[in-house]
Each structure stands twice: as C-alpha cells, then as structure tokens.
Image (cartoon, rainbow, N blue to C red):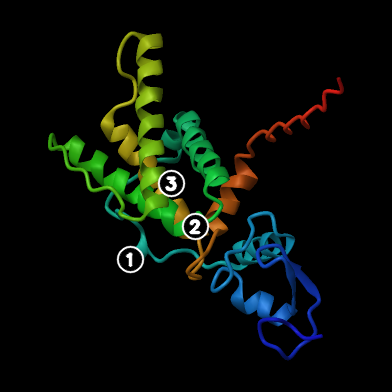
C-alpha cells in the first residue's frame, strides 16, 4: 500500500484533513499548501512550534504601517481588547474550520485602515471580499463597538478612542504577519492565538434520550 498523494512511499502518518494515512514527506510538503490541515493535527502543531522557534524577524521594510509607533505599555494597558479580538477570531474559526491566516490578516488590515481614516475625520470602509474574511471583519468590528459601549457605560465617557483601536489593530496585524508562514493555507497565526488565548472547551451535547412508553 502506498501514499495516496505521491503513490510511491508507504503511508505512516494519519492525516485528519484527508481521513487517511499519507507519507511523512507528503505531509511536510503539502501541509497548508494543497491540504487544508485540521487545526488540532499533532503534526501541524509540532511544525508550527518548530517554525516559530526558527523564524526570522520581519524586516523593517515589511512591517505594517512602519511609521506608526505602538508602545509595549500601550498594548498591555489594552490587553483585554487584544484578548477579546483573539477570542472573536477563534470563536469564528469554530464555525469556519477553513479559516486561514490570510483571512485574519485581511480582516484586521481592513479594519485598521477604517480606523486610521476615522482618526482623520473621514469615514472610509473597504471590507474584504472573501466570505470568511468578511465575516471576521464584521465580527471584530462588532466586538470593538460593544466593548467601547460597555466601557463608556461603566466610566461615563468614551475611554477607547478610534486612534486607540487603530493602534491595537496595528499591533495584531504586525503579530499576524510575524507568526504566519508563506504557505497559502497557513494557520500558524491562528495556532499562535489558540496557544496564548485558549477558549473554554465547548460543552458536550447531551445524547438524545429514548423515551420508552
């Protein structure tokens, strides 16, 4: 029996995405390229961990909005917002198992541009076109508005400005581009969020009871 992808080597690794065993070489070459890997695949998680440990820093020329300074203290001060956005992303991924880093990057980048223009007094909105990225764009935008409403109700005034949200989104955009990989179906950034912002386990559905007359 040979690997169903290459047809040459013996299949030794079970691929959750394909529901069958494939060889180790095809697993390494095709993961997140031609295979929509399952987020909880142990081989994918191990690969992300290894790549994160050996990843080169993004060059200054590739830094998103490189002229914008985001202080470390500012990020920690607004950590609840960062965590809320991460939870929003991960919750939506539970509904869209095919979500990729590119969807998250597109959504965050589009929102950052929206809030950048709001800071200049001009409202400009250009949501992503792809369905999953668009859903995420709307979900994060809704979270930010609700968070600002709750903070305003508690403090009696608006505490989270448009410029604050812009800088928070810039931080996440830079983080996403740092953590992702060049593979077209990469989920490395999403895996990074799962490791650092774990969601509570979903409650198991109660098995239907059989009523005996």
Q: Secondary structure at mark 1?
A: helix
| Front residue of this view, candidates 202 and 155 | 202
Q: Nearer the viewer, mark 1 or mark 2?
A: 2
Badge 1 or badge 3: first in the primary sequence? 1
Residue 207 in the image: above or below residue 179: above
Tell me the quadrant of the picture where the N terminus can be found: bottom right
Q: Residue furthest front?
A: 213
Residue 46 location, x and y as percent? Answer: 71, 62
Badge 2 or badge 3: first in the primary sequence? 2
| Front residue of this view, candidates 121 and 53 | 121
Residue 50 in the image: above or below residue 91: below
Mark 2 and mark 3 in contact? Answer it, CB < 8 Å: no
Mark 1 crowdedness (10 Å alpha carbons): few <14, some 14-19, many ≥20: few
Mark 2 crowdedness (10 Å alpha carbons): few <14, some 14-19, many ≥20: many
Q: Nearer the viewer, mark 2 or mark 3?
A: 2
Asked which quadrant contains residue 142, the reply is top left
User: Which residue is denoted by mark 2 in the rendering?
Assistant: 100
Q: Secondary structure at mark 3?
A: helix
Q: Residue at 18% across / 41% down in the picture? A: 117
**Cα–Cα gap, marks 2 and 3:** 15 Å
Q: Residue at 44% across / 64% down in the picture? A: 58
Mark 1 and mark 2 in contact? Answer it, CB < 8 Å: no
- Do we see residue 174 in this rendering? no
Badge 1 or badge 2: first in the primary sequence? 1
Q: Nearer the viewer, mark 1 or mark 3?
A: 3
Residue 181 numbered tag: none
Residue 134 relative to residue 23: left or right: left
User: Which residue is denoted by mark 1 in the rendering?
Assistant: 61
User: Which residue is denoted by mark 3 in the rendering?
Assistant: 172
């Amino acid at each position: 029996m040979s690997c169903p992808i290459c047809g040459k080597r013996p299949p030794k690794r079970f691929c959750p995405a394909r529901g069958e065993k494939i060889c180790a070489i095809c697993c390494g070459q095709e993961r997140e390229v031609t295979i929509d890997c399952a987020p909880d695949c142990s081989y994918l998680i191990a690969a992300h961990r290894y790549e994160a440990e050996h990843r080169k820093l993004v060059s200054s020329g590739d830094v998103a909005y490189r002229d914008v300074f985001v202080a470390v203290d500012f990020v920690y001060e607004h950590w609840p917002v960062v965590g809320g956005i991460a939870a929003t992303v991960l919750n939506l991924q539970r509904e869209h198992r095919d979500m990729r880093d590119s969807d998250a990057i597109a959504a965050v980048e589009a929102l950052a541009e929206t809030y950048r223009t709001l800071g200049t007094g001009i409202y400009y909105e250009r949501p992503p076109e792809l369905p999953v990225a668009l859903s995420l764009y709307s979900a994060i935008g809704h979270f930010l508005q609700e968070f600002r409403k709750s903070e305003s109700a508690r403090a009696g005034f608006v505490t989270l400005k448009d410029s604050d949200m812009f800088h928070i989104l810039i931080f996440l955009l830079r983080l996403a581009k740092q953590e992702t990989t060049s593979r077209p179906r990469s989920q490395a950034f999403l895996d990074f969020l799962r490791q650092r912002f774990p969601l509570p386990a979903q409650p198991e559905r109660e098995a239907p009871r059989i009523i005996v007359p």
